[in-house]
Image: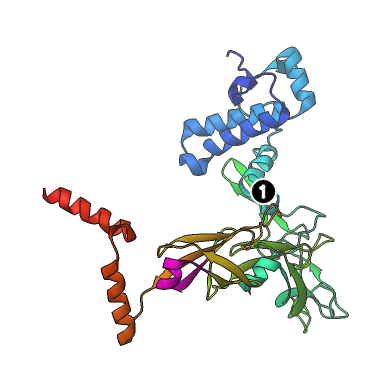
């Protein structure tokens, strides 16, 4: 039977790094896994071949011997389960395969702890607090190690006992046809022990719910959806692993006067017909008081006038946004007799130059009719 090239089986060059070989194996193992192929016989044989090749190339010493002699123990590679599996099926290669599927957290590592759970908190702030920053006090619930049992879950004076099903390892081996996998023990759920006398304070969980109060600094420039991370304010880890983190999601409340567009604030301000026609200087609101705004003569309704540097700060501190005043010219709703007479006189005394938009519109209509 002709010798098969291990690198060709995995689809990598001979210069491939160990990590490249590992990634190529994981991809092929996933492709030819029985769950994906429905037990196809050809795929099953291909998977055996892939695993056997990887078992050699993942080991630097075996790989060096193969690179030098083209075989293991003087025998050319023929595929299948030779060269290093020792009849143990897929146990060794599938360690890497399950790392790919589930990551480090997918299986319990002996002697290793688990980082604490991260927590989330939704915090509502005002637009002014978002603009200038604020110190906010928050209260949230989190689990803490039970003080009575010190986290063991067992009543004081007792201790957890080794799990009878897994013998204290937290894992059990399950056979699936021609290969076997290691899974979390269903009886102890990976803990390796069972509790016969649970702690009354925590009902055997080893954790109790507590309320935590915390002062949080909200930086200037945040917006709805901004996230603050407070390291180490999550729940405690196990086995000496660090605590989780607290993630605070911000929501900026709507403002009665201002609409936010990034770092720009928009405020709609009404003015009179006379102010729009003659021009004026008015005072407009800002997030920190008031500011003067000059209304040029002939200002039209809907015009945007800009006040530099009176908007929202950039979260990164690069610049300060602007305040845009959207002018709304208000037509008098009620007129006295004198006001009506004065406006009539004003209309009679005017000409087309006073209303260029109206004159332009009339010219277009006349041209279309002609």
Give whichever of 100, 367 is nearer the camera: 367
Q: Quadrant of the N terminus?
A: top right
Residue picked out by circle 1:
103
Question: Is 278 a magenta residue?
Answer: yes
Q: Is residue 110 left or right of residue 300?
A: right
Which residue lies most toward the bottom here?
336
Q: Please determine whether, in this image, residue 278 is positioned above or below residue 138.
A: above
Q: Please determine whether, in this image, residue 300 is positioned above or below residue 210.
A: above
**Which portion, as a residue range, is magenta?**
267-280
x, y percent for residue 215: 77, 74
Give the quadrant of residue 167: bottom right
x, y percent for residue 348: 26, 69
Question: Is 327 a magenta residue?
Answer: no
Crowd rating for badge 1 (residues with CA inside 10 Å; few <14, some 14–19, many 20+) = few
Residue, x 56% and y 39% (percent of image)?
Answer: 30
Give whichever of 125, 294 is nearer the camera: 294
Give the quadrant of residue 334: bottom left
Q: Secondary structure under badge 1?
A: loop
x, y percent for residue 79: 61, 24
Residue, x 68% and y 40% (percent of image)?
Answer: 96
Give whichever of 198, 290 is nearer the camera: 290
Q: Please determine whether, in this image, residue 38 is positioned above or below residue 119.
A: above
Q: Is residue 180 left or right of residue 206?
A: left
Residue, x 67% and y 37% (percent of image)?
Answer: 93
Residue, x 78% and y 79% (percent of image)?
Answer: 197
Give the quadrant of residue 339: bottom left
């Amino acid at each position: 039977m002709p010798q098969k090239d291990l690198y060709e089986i995995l689809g990598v060059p001979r210069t491939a790094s160990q990590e490249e070989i590992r990634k190529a194996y994981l991809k092929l193992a996933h492709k030819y896994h029985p769950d994906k192929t429905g037990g196809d016989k050809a795929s099953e044989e291909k998977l055996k071949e892939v695993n056997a090749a990887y078992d050699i190339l993942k080991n630097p010493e075996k790989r060096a011997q193969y690179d030098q002699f083209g075989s293991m123990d003087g025998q050319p590679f023929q595929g299948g389960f030779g060269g290093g599996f020792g009849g143990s099926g897929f146990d060794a290669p599938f360690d890497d395969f399950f790392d790919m599927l589930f990551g480090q957290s997918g299986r319990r590592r002996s002697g290793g702890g688990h980082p604490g759970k991260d927590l989330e908190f939704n915090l509502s702030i005002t637009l002014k607090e978002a603009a200038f920053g604020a110190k906010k006090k928050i209260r949230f619930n989190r689990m803490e190690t039970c003080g009575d049992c010190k986290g063991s879950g067992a009543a004081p004076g007792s201790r957890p006992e080794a799990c009878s099903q897994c013998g204290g390892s937290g894992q059990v081996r399950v056979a699936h046809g021609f290969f076997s996998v290691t899974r979390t023990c269903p009886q102890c759920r990976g803990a390796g022990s069972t509790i016969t006398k649970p702690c009354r304070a925590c009902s055997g969980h080893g954790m109790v719910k507590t309320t935590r109060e915390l002062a949080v600094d909200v930086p200037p420039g945040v917006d709805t959806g901004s996230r603050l991370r407070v390291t180490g304010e999550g729940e405690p880890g196990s086995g000496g692993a660090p605590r989780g983190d607290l993630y605070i999601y911000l929501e900026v409340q709507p403002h009665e006067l201002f609409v936010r567009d990034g770092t720009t604030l928009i405020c709609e301000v009404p003015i009179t017909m006379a102010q729009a026609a003659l021009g004026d200087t008015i005072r407009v609101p800002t997030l920190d008081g008031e500011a003067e705004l000059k209304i040029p003569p002939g200002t039209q309704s809907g015009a945007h006038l800009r006040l530099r540097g009176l908007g929202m700060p950039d979260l990164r501190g690069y610049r300060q946004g602007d305040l845009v005043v959207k002018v709304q010219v208000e037509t008098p709703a009620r007129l006295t007799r004198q006001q009506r007479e004065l406006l009539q006189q004003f209309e009679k005394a005017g000409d087309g130059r006073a209303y260029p938009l109206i004159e332009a519109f009339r010219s277009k209509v006349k041209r279309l009719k002609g």
